[in-house]
Image (cartoon, coloured by chain):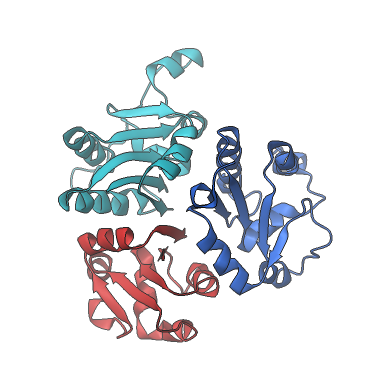
Chain colours: A red, B cyan, C blue
């Protein structure tokens, strides 16, 4: 299973779209840094093509820093840094999209 | 697990150094080993001893130094990327006729082979891009 | 050559003159090849512009990336890939490229990522 991380805001950068385009399950998708804006409802349409085998996560600290932790779409599981580490070990490799 | 980390983003123009640091600290907290951190591209600026951010801002280079010292982490800075950007140790400063060296203690200049090696000989290689 | 699970896929997303990303990726590929690590390259997104045949880097006093890319077969780096959609989106002709790259649809691109042991992206 591949862990995909995206650290760019979807409103101004194509990284998230490109990641989703090249993604097939089973996989984990983790939004970090400015990528966490992608977890807000305005961008849920981007995730529609993903099936149930792609699990979506978003990093808690980056949400809190941006004041958007209350805006996270239900598709996402909010995880802390330790859970990020565990996720990176549960997956056998990673692709960073930036 | 043995985990290697690639920092490929500027410490000022990206969050790569900060996010990678948080990841590394959390991994160590869970009992895993960070074997090597490789600084490449703009990431090499994080190894400059001359960065002097305001006191109420984090100096990520210093944080990495402390973490590396406490947990015996190899911190490798890509030599080609570093020379290109003016991050030099004493030896390279002399070789290139420069008046000063600025590679912070705890960081080591070395080749890209160290990244290729980390990619294949660690349990995981975690990339933080800029 | 190393077994597939020990092979490295370098994913590059930048055009030839976008900071040092394209060159950083290529340098890692050449280093890996020198260490006899099996290595492939996926040219995604703007990186397909690296494959245009008539680049004249000297017009902006830059070093030619294309010349180094053309040397890849000499280093036995022959696993070269690009998503067909990246070329189409940019109106590029797949028959007129610097290097023989294997064109992939989106499903094949996803499968490619699964097939390599490690992936490093630039």
Q: Left of C88 or right of it: where is C113?
A: left
Q: Position of residue B50 (x, y in %)?
A: 32, 31
Q: Left of B63 or right of it: where is A21?
A: right
Identify which residue, B34 or C23, lies in the foreground. B34
Q: Position of residue B124 (x, y in %)?
A: 36, 50
Identify which residue, B61 or C23, lies in the foreground. C23
Q: Left of C72 or right of it: where is A67?
A: left
Query: Considering only vertical position in the picture, is B117 above or below B103?
Result: below
Query: Considering only vertical position in the picture, is A21 above or below C61?
Result: below
Q: Left of B23 or right of it: where is B56?
A: left
Total number of numbered labels? 0
Q: Residue at x 45, y 39 (%)?
A: B115
Identify which residue, B62 or A94, lies in the foreground. A94
Q: Position of residue B93 (x, y in %)?
A: 44, 17
Q: Residue at x 30, y 54 (%)?
A: B19
Q: Position of residue C41 (x, y in %)?
A: 62, 52
Query: Considering only vertical position in the picture, is B85 above or below B15?
Result: above
Q: Residue at x 64, y 60 (%)?
A: C46
Q: If the image is split into quadrants, where does the N terminus of chain C sit?
A: top right
User: To which quarter of the image does residue B15 belong?
Assistant: bottom left
User: To which quarter of the image does residue A6 belong?
Assistant: bottom left
């Amino acid at each position: 299973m591949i862990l995909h991380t995206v650290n760019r805001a979807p409103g101004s950068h194509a990284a998230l779209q490109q990641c989703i385009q090249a993604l097939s399950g089973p996989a984990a998708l983790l939004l970090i840094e400015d990528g966490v804006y992608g977890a807000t409802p305005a961008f849920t349409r981007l995730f529609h093509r993903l099936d149930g085998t792609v699990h979506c996560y978003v990093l808690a600290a980056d949400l809190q820093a941006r004041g958007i932790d209350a805006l996270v779409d239900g598709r996402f599981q909010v995880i802390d840094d330790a859970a990020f580490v565990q996720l990176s070990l549960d997956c056998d490799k990673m692709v960073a999209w930036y | 697990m043995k985990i290697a980390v690639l920092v490929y983003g500027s410490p000022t123009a990206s969050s790569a150094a900060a996010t990678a640091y948080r990841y590394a600290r959390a991994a160590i907290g869970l009992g895993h080993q960070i074997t090597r951190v490789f600084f490449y591209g703009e990431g090499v600026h994080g190894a400059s001893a001359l960065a002097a951010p305001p006191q109420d801002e984090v100096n990520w280079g210093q944080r990495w130094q402390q973490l590396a010292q406490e947990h015996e982490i190899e911190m490798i800075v890509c030599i080609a990327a570093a020379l290109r950007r003016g991050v030099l140790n004493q030896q390279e400063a002399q070789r290139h006729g420069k008046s000063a060296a600025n590679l912070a203690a705890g960081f080591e200049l070395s080749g890209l082979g160290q990244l290729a090696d980390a990619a294949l000989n660690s349990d995981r290689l975690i990339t933080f891009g800029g | 050559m190393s077994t597939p699970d020990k092979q490295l896929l370098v994913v590059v997303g930048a055009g030839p003159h976008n900071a040092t990303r394209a060159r950083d990726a290529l340098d890692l590929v050449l280093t890996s090849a020198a260490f006899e690590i099996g290595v492939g390259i996926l040219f995604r997104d703007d990186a397909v512009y690296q494959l245009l045949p008539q680049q004249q880097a000297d017009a902006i006093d830059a070093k030619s990336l294309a010349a180094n890319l053309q040397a890849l077969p000499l280093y036995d780096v022959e696993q070269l890939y690009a998503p067909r959609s990246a070329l189409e989106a940019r109106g590029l002709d797949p028959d007129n490229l610097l290097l023989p790259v294997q064109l992939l649809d989106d499903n094949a691109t996803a499968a490619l990522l699964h097939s390599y042991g490690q992936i490093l992206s630039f």
